[in-house]
Amino acid sequence: MVTIVVDEDMHRSVAVPLKQLGHQVLDVRDHGLRGAPDQEVFAFAQRRGAALLTGDLDFANLLAFPLGTHHGIILTRFPNELSTQRINEEIVGSLIILEPGRIRIRRP
């Protein structure tokens, strides 16, 4: 199982399929971190040995968050017109493979 911290820019419902898959999911809003600086959110995830799930492009800054120094940052870029329900439907039952330079999704 993976522990995942969900940043405040993600809809709360993204935690549902992750929890159904057996992962521990922590939402920053439930831990007094709404509006907290990125470094504070990052530190929270690291103290818990968790990957950070975010849509905040600031977390893509390799100088601020160097590769190999954390438990993982998952930066999602979904179009605004794509509903959270549709995003969740894409995850449940699918195999998502993240590789350097590409993402493969196998749907049922």
Image (cartoon, rainbow, N blue to C red):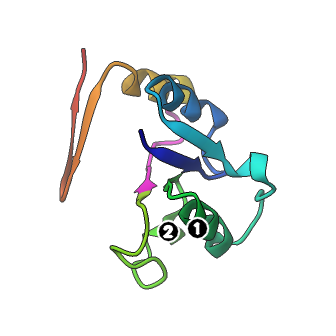
Q: Earlier in the sequence, mark 1 or mark 2?
A: 1
Q: SS of the residue at dot 2?
A: helix
Q: Residue at image x 52%, y 47%?
A: 4
Can you say whether 47 is above or below 86 in the image? below
Residue 43: horizontal and vertical position, in percent?
Answer: 61, 70
Crowding near the residue tagged with mark 2, few <14, some 14–19, many ≥20 C-alpha atoms within 10 Å: many
Q: Amino acid at mark 1?
A: Phe
Looking at the rendering, the stretch of residues picked out in magenta corresponds to 74-83
Along the line of sight, which residue is nearer the eye, 97 or 77? 97
Find disc 1 in the rendering and name its residue. 42
56 vs 27, left or right, is left
Find disc 2 in the rendering and name its residue. 59
Along the line of sight, which residue is nearer the eye, 41 or 108? 41
Residue 78 highlighted magenta (yes or no): yes
Residue 44: horizontal and vertical position, in percent?
Answer: 64, 63
Along the line of sight, which residue is nearer the eye, 6 or 44? 44
